[in-house]
Image (cartoon, rainbow, N blue to C red):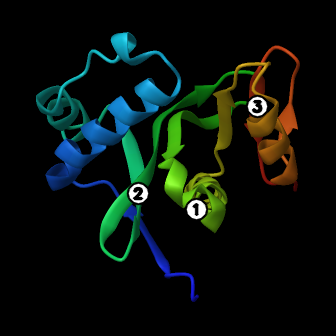
């Protein structure tokens, strides 16, 4: 069976309902749904204001949104460079064997390269599957649960 070609694109205002649904699915997946307190209206207001408070990418397979990555832009004081902080990365479980998580991460890295930004995020130290995934992507992982990626000059 041929694997459908995914499409990765920036999140747009019309995506907030599907994004909210995926955020809730991530909360359910991590047994932390009670901590999801955002709403589609709040996502719309904060993501599409001037300046936007967050940005992100949606991955679609055959026109269906099956995953996302969200991030914020700020400044990494130690490196003296812009920083992209990944907030969430999520792919529905039934689509995880297609390499979509890697494609999302690499697209975030591409966005970072455009502004010479450092990319950082955190991961629970006991989430060894995710840590192994990040290491395969060539990221630096610290035992504290922090991860980082930057183009090597």
- Mark 3 vs mark 1, foreground winner is 1
* Residue appearing at x 60%, y 35% in the figure: 83
59 above or below 54?
below
Measured from the top left, where is residue 65 in percent x and y?
A: 34, 59
Disc assigned to residue 100: 1
Residue furthest to the left = 41
Quadrant of image for the C terminus? bottom right
100 above or below 54?
below
Q: Quadrant of residue 51?
A: top left
The residue under label 2 is 66
The residue under label 3 is 147
Asked whether 94 or 51 is in front, the reply is 94
The answer for how far apart the CA atoms under marks 1 and 2 are is: 9 Å
The answer for how far apart the CA atoms under marks 3 and 2 are is: 24 Å
* Residue appearing at x 46%, y 15% in the figure: 32
Q: Secondary structure at mark 2?
A: strand
Q: Is residue 60 toward the left or the right of residue 118 in the image? A: left
Asked whether 121 or 29 is in front, the reply is 29
Q: Are the residues at dot 1 and dot 2 in contact (C-beta closer than 8 Å)?
A: yes
Measured from the top left, where is residue 72 in percent x and y?
A: 46, 34
* Residue appearing at x 55%, y 57% in the figure: 111
N-terminal-most mark, 3 or 2? 2
Q: Are the residues at dot 3 and dot 1 in contact (C-beta closer than 8 Å)?
A: no
N-terminal-most mark, 1 or 2? 2
N-terminal-most mark, 3 or 1? 1
Q: Secondary structure at mark 3?
A: strand
Asked whether 45 or 123 is in front, the reply is 123
Measured from the top left, where is residue 140 in percent x and y?
A: 86, 37
Measured from the top left, where is residue 100 in percent x and y?
A: 58, 62
């Amino acid at each position: 069976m041929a694997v459908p070609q995914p499409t990765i694109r920036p999140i747009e205002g019309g995506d907030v309902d599907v994004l909210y649904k995926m955020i809730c699915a991530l909360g359910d997946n991590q047994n932390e749904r009670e901590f999801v307190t955002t709403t589609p209206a709040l996502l719309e207001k904060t993501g599409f204001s001037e300046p936007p408070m967050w940005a992100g990418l949606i991955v679609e397979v055959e026109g269906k949104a099956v995953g996302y990555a969200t991030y914020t832009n700020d400044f990494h004081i130690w490196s003296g460079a812009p920083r992209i902080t990944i907030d969430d990365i999520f792919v529905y479980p039934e689509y995880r064997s297609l390499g979509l998580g890697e494609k999302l991460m690499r697209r975030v890295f591409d966005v970072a390269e455009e502004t010479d930004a450092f990319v950082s995020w955190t991961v629970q130290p006991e989430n060894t599957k995710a840590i192994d995934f990040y290491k395969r992507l060539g990221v630096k992982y610290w035992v504290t649960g922090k991860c980082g990626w930057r183009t090597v000059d």
